Amino acid sequence: MGSQGRSGPPGNGGPGEGEGGEARKLQEGRVARGKRRKGKGKGKARAGQGGRGSGTEGKPGPQTAKEAAGPGADAGARACPREEAEGGGSVEEGVRGIVKGVEGSAGAGKEAQGREYGKKEEWRVRARRREGARPGRAQGRGGQAWADIAGTRVAMAAAAEEEEEAAARESAARPAAGPALWRLPEELLLLICSYLDMRALGRLAQVCRWLRRFTSCDLLWRRIARASLNSGFTRLGTDLMTSVPVKERVKVSQNWRLGRCREGILLKWRCSQMPWMQLEDDSLYISQANFILAYQFRPDGASLNRRPLGVFAGHDEDVCHFVLANSHIVSAGGDGKIGVHKIHSTFTVKYSAHEQEVNCVDCKGGIIVSGSRDRTAKVWPLASGRLGQCLHTIQTEDRVWSIAISPLLSSFVTGTACCGHFSPLRIWDLNSGQLMTHLGSDFPPGAGVLDVMYESPFTLLSCGYDTYVRYWDLRTSVRKCVMEWEEPHDSTLYCLQTDGNHLLATGSSYYGVVRLWDRRQRACLHAFPLTSTPLSSPVYCLRLTTKHLYAALSYNLHVLDFQNP
């Protein structure tokens, strides 16, 4: 009875008919706008006109009502459980339940669509502010989709940039709260933190973003870097790599200290060679037979572009030695000639210099010095108009294996085979060619010097057949070296290289052994054998940077990568 009272008979103008009419109008309007449920909407209209009748004319089937209402029918049924429980019910009540379900589902859908549309509009506005609108590409359905995707991507990138900028601003800002220590002036904080060691600075950088930025200052790490191995600082404190943060160099120097590296091969040769190499910026110059090839490093520094940048020829026999000076390559060959090549042009000049093979050459300040197996050392000008004019000929009375010019350009040193009754290390005046002094007095016969290099105007390093590396300081004594390091396996030392501070690298004559030394210690730090027994080879040349060490052997050019071990 309650159900009948609420509905009322059709045509009486009761509340039941009014509510049913409103429901029918809402449903018909929604069907007319959608155009997809047109046929179903007509069935609903006919069902509504039948009132409470149960015949086929006035009462729609249950399946038709559900199809007309769509997914909202179930929601409508759930919304009116009392009416279903009371039994019976009119068609208007069923329509009201269906309409409520439809309205509920449509409202939720509209709300979700509105949120999504609002987000898209926000992204589009941001994108237009930065890159401008692209109306030509947004025409049509495909164009509109493309424009939405492109705008979304641009907006996401812009949002990421904004977040990074905000993070940078946040990290740059000093924390408002915290100990009173952080409120001190930065100059005073730098002074306090300069007493911390590497581990304490690393822990301090983990406190907050501002301290992480503050502890990355080069001033805090300079003292630590000068005490580290191969960090880019000379013994006098000169920074050789100002473009690289000092903190990053200190991190890599720990790999040098611990011997952590990754070995690789850059180049291979089919036949045995005696290669020599030089480094300049991002280029590698290496001799192969009677050629000198220039290669460019890839950004990682541990690999080369296979196609050479240039090939420099001119010798009839193998290139024994060469140096880079003033955009020139000055080479010494087994044919007794000296070659001069301009790096960035095809200019090449070669001239006869010695009667036998030229074993070594050096060039500084427009002066070339050469040493030969014919027991002479000669001085030459580099000026283009005077190439081939010998300035001085010096009788060394022994075969010359190595030579180096002083940084002061006032003298040069020769390393000989030590077959006579005199020191294999002698210093000559560059201007007059006269003997100035000789170094050491206790060399055994045959202790020839295969490599010598100036580290400063008053200090130099030498190595050779006597298996020792010697460090000389001309300000203290020329009769005895300041310090020496002995090769543990009594192997001849073919070459040496230093970082100008604490690190020393040597190349041995057997099994391609490269040794790293800390000059503050007597013992070898690490050893890296680069060849096996069947392919035993000396290490003919060594070169190093703060991240890599390069070793030239008979058949391969090896690299030890300390940046990515």
Image: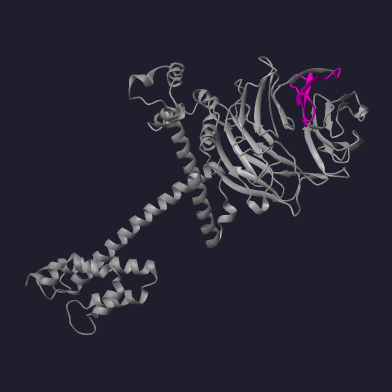
Q: Is 420 covered by the magenta stretch? A: yes
Quadrant position of residue 402? top right
Asked if residue 140 lies left or right of residue 378, the reply is left
Residue 528 in percent (x, y) is at 59, 43
Of residues 443 and 449, the one nearer the viewer is 443
Residue 283, x across and y down, in percent: 71, 40
- The colouring scheme, among rainbow, by chain, secondary structure or one colour, is one colour
Q: How many numbered circles does the render carry?
A: 0
Name the spot of residue 207 as percent of width and height, x first. Answer: 37, 31
Whether residue 423 is visible, yes or no, is: yes
Asked if residue 329 shows in the view, the reply is no
Question: Residue pushed farthest bottom?
Answer: 56
The quadrant holding residue 169 is top left
The vertical placement of 507 against 108, above or below, is above
Q: Where is residue 410 in the image (x, y as percent from the top left)?
A: 79, 18
The quadrant of the image that shows the N terminus is bottom left
Range covered by the magenta-colored residues: 404-433
The residue lying furthest to the left in this view is 1
As for residue 521 lying within the magenta part, the answer is no
Pick whichever, 339 or 96, lies toward us: 339
Looking at the rendering, which quadrant does residue 70 occupy?
bottom left
The residue drawn where x is 47% and y is 43% is 160
Work out whether residue 247 or residue 413 is closer to the camera in this orientation and state it.
413
